[in-house]
Image: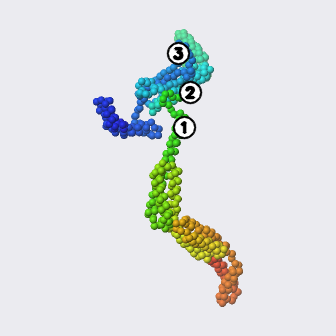
Amino acid sequence: ELIGGGMRVPKVQAGLSSVLGDKELGKHINSDESMALGAAFFGANISTAFRVRQVGLVDINPFPVAVSLEDLEEREEKADDEEVWNKQATVFKANGKIGVKKTIAFTHDKDVHCSLDYAEPEKLPTGSKSEMQRYKITGIGEFAKEMEEKGLGKPKVSLQFEMSQSGITSLVKAEAAVEETYTVTEEVEVEDEEEGEKSNETDSTEESKERKMEESNEESTPEAETKDETAGEEAEDNSEKESKTDEEQSEDDSDGKDKADAEEKPKKKTKVIEKEKKRTHKKTLTVEAYHVGKIQPLSKELMEEYKFNLAELKRKDQERFMLEEAKNTLEAYIYKIKNKLIDQEEDIAKISTEEQREGLSKLSMEAEDWLFDEGDTASLETIKAKYEELTTPAEKMWFRLSEMTARPQAIKELTDKITEVEEKFNKWVTNMTHITDEEKSDVAEKIENARKWIADKEKEQEAKAPHEDPAFTSEEVPSQILPVQKLVARLVKKPKPKVEKNETEEKTSSETDSKTSDEPDKEQSSESTEKEESTEATEEKEEPAGEGGKESEEAEAKEDDKGEEDTGEEL
């Protein structure tokens, strides 16, 4: 089955067919898609950033890798019969899985030199070298001396090699270890052997006593038969005695069993014993890697050189981008000048002379010819200088063109704004007695200054020709009303002074109220009691009248404040 993009090439297919002979080439799957899909699954399997279902892809190492070990120190001349220490082993066999680790272990007391090579160089592709990597492993001799001083043996060295998912073999771990056996004393509980011997002796003495009792009983039985058994009382007495003796014997037997159980429990005692234990002394070895052969890793010097080259290439690319952008900007502005001189010919004629227009048109044509001739190899600074040379007269003309309409519009808006502020201020200030005449005149003066500025600038502009630079710009006009607005806003926020009540006015108002209230009372009755009642009534009426006067004054003050706030908002 053909896979890979190169399988689409007819020449490749013909070459494969000539090599395979009669075998038909399989073209059942999309060769490009199969390679891309397989690479995506393989990358997801070996990546730690993705969690996908295991596809079951297994890659192999086609060539075996061997390890060679020898002493690191320079060997002196040795006798012919003296052997040189070295070890060799094939760590990764041919067609084995990649992404695995293997460890080799050996006993040695000197620093070693490790070589990683392909085990079968003849099977490598033509021109390939068998050397892969070299390692100087140090620290073994020093560690061996330390262990020898402690009376221990030679260290056991472990070297761990890894073949990564990329098929690269390397030494990842080097360690030396020595196992030490030592004894420790511990206290343990054991049974007391002397107590056991005593219990055995007591048991044997009791057994001998029982045997003697049995023999004596057997001897006394025939004598008991010859005795007179006719006496009933004696027989009863004997039976009672026997029952008592049986009870006493049962009690003695129970006591004896308890004592025996107590004696049967073994007694323990602590005993000091010695035990053997093991501990391991470990040391991580120092590994220095280097390469031999044509293929060498990047050194620090080469890395710095390559970084500098990349930075230089990036700088040149940036300059090229800026140069292309400057050329495009200059070309676009040339076309802008041509189009504007044609599309707005009438308006441009009002603010420029024929000489100015022809000069600008000629300048743009010369810039265009230069751009496509000398500008092709010009530097960035030259392109920028040419752009400034072209834009300076053109931008002045475009500015006069825009100001031709923007300036009169700004003057009209400013005049309307001044008139509006003046009318509202005059209407509002009539009710504001706390605004002084000096402040009113200050507002009027600033309004007059704004109008004077407009008149002066318009007069200056009329004195200038349309093709000359304007006397003022439209951006300067709106700022002339700002002093007036700031002053009016400050006056609007000015608080009113507090009104103080006049005592004489209150007395006169109360006397007039009392006179008007006394006249109807005198006509109705002339009695003294009625006079007193009338005076009390007049006093009661005076108080509401005074309160009513206060309420009316407060209402008028509120109306004035509202009018002041409304006027301030309008201003």
* Front tag of 3 and 2: 3
- Cα distance between the residues tagged 3 and 1: 46 Å
**Mark 3 belongs to which amino acid?**
Glu
- Could you tell me which secondary element the residue under label 1 belongs to? helix
* Front tag of 1 and 2: 1
- Cα distance between the residues tagged 3 and 2: 26 Å
- Residue 111 spot, x, y in % from top left: 56, 23
- Could you tell me which secondary element the residue under label 3 belongs to? loop
| Left or right: 491 as drawn, with respect to 327 | right
**Mark 2 belongs to which amino acid?**
Leu
- Location of mark 3 (residue): 83
Label whose residue precedes the other's in the sequence (3 or 1): 3
Residue 151: image quadrant is top right
| Left or right: 504 as drawn, with respect to 368 | right
Q: Is residue 420 above or below residue 363?
A: below
Residue 430: image quadrant is bottom right
| Left or right: 501 as drawn, with respect to 347 | right
Residue for point 57% across, 17% down: 76
In the foreground, 35 or 316: 316
- Location of mark 2 (residue): 285
Label whose residue precedes the other's in the sequence (1 or 2): 2
Q: Is residue 452 above or below residue 26?
A: below
- Location of mark 1 (residue): 304
Q: Is residue 154 above or below residue 59?
A: above
